Amino acid sequence: MNRIDRLSAILIQLQGKKIVKAAEISERFNISLRTVYRDVRALQEAGVPIGAEAGTGYYLVEGYHLPPVMFSREEAAALLTGEKLMANLSDHSNRKEFSNAMQKIKAVLRGSEKDFLESLEDNIAVVSRRPPVGEEFPNRFLSDIQYALGKQQMLQLDYFAMHSETLTKREVEPIGIIYTSGNWHLIAWCRLRHGYRDFRMDRIKNVSVSADSYDKTRHITLKEYMDRYGEYEAQAHMVKLRFPRAFARRIGDQKFYYGLVEEQAVGECIEMTFLAPCLEWFGRWLLVWGSVPEIISPAELADKMKELALEIKQHYL
């Protein structure tokens, strides 16, 4: 990148945040701190009102705005790809907001870039392996949760716990959101349980943002949570099952709801791999299929199935 382009990019970066540290600029453009100081000084000499706080960073003086930003063809294509991803991986609330933002972005594109995007529109697709979330839990709260995170405000949830099949009311202090294994998760301090909890957002029936605020400095960061509790998906149990090929078709879309991550043909069978957050909950679903599935791993699941089968036998005796 030549210096003129870099100066323009630094100016855009300054407008994007309240305070930008010199180290952030250095890391982004792979330049030395001395070069950062020279570039900022050059912008100031050109009349850009850049202020500095010792030990904190640079900022643009309140009221200064850049003219509308123009996007390159590659940047426009990247934004279109992002829109396709949002349509499949986000929830109803964010889909609408991102779509509105994209309309504004497309409005400032040059004619040639608009034509390019239109020709590209039908040639990018994102296919999710998971079926859409049912309307019983509409999963439209991502925007509300993001607002609460930004404003440090409490959230009140009506949350459906799958393992106990009960709806509980929770008052939580959010620390972050994670997208993993096909679902969004809210990580928060739960006042009911007096500890950090993982709430799958498609199991949240209702959300309200409380007027009460909380002090986020009392909590660990999202990164600290993930580091402390290990690799995020490692919290789930890796389950491998084998079904006769002809029988596997009967399972249909249920396998997606129970955490399917992979399936492959093995001889006359279909081997399925799941990430199960709770072996008992997973085992109760497995009972539906009787003696048909073969449990490859883990051994704890086979033990759990014996317990569940004995429980049913004793119930009907």
Image: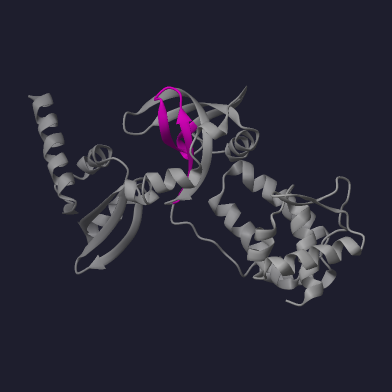
Name the foreground residue: 266 vs 148. Answer: 148
Name the foreground residue: 36 vs 100. Answer: 36
Residue 51, visible in the rendered structure: yes
**Residue 178 drawn at (x, y percent):** 49, 46
Q: Main secondary structure of the magenta part?
A: strand
Q: Is residue 29 above or below residue 280?
A: below
**Residue 110 drawn at (x, y percent):** 84, 68
Residue 132, visible in the rendered structure: no
**Residue 9 drawn at (x, y percent):** 76, 65
Considering every residue shown, the one lying at the far right of the view is 47
Image quadrant holding the N terminus, namely: bottom right
**Residue 171 drawn at (x, y percent):** 50, 24
Q: Name the residue: 55% across, 34% down.
A: 217
Q: Name the residue: 64% across, 36% down.
A: 147
Residue 103 falls inside the magenta stretch: no
Left/right placement of residue 21 relative to residue 292 reads right
Name the foreground residue: 127 vs 169. Answer: 169
Left/right placement of residue 228 relative to residue 41 reads left
Name the foreground residue: 128 vs 154. Answer: 154
Q: Name the residue: 16% across, 45% down.
A: 300
Q: Is residue 54 above or below residue 135?
A: below
Considering every residue shown, the one lying at the far left of the view is 317
Start-end of magenta stretch: 182-204
Residue 201 falls inside the magenta stretch: yes
Q: Name the residue: 41% across, 48% down.
A: 227
Left/right placement of residue 277 relative to residue 219 reads left
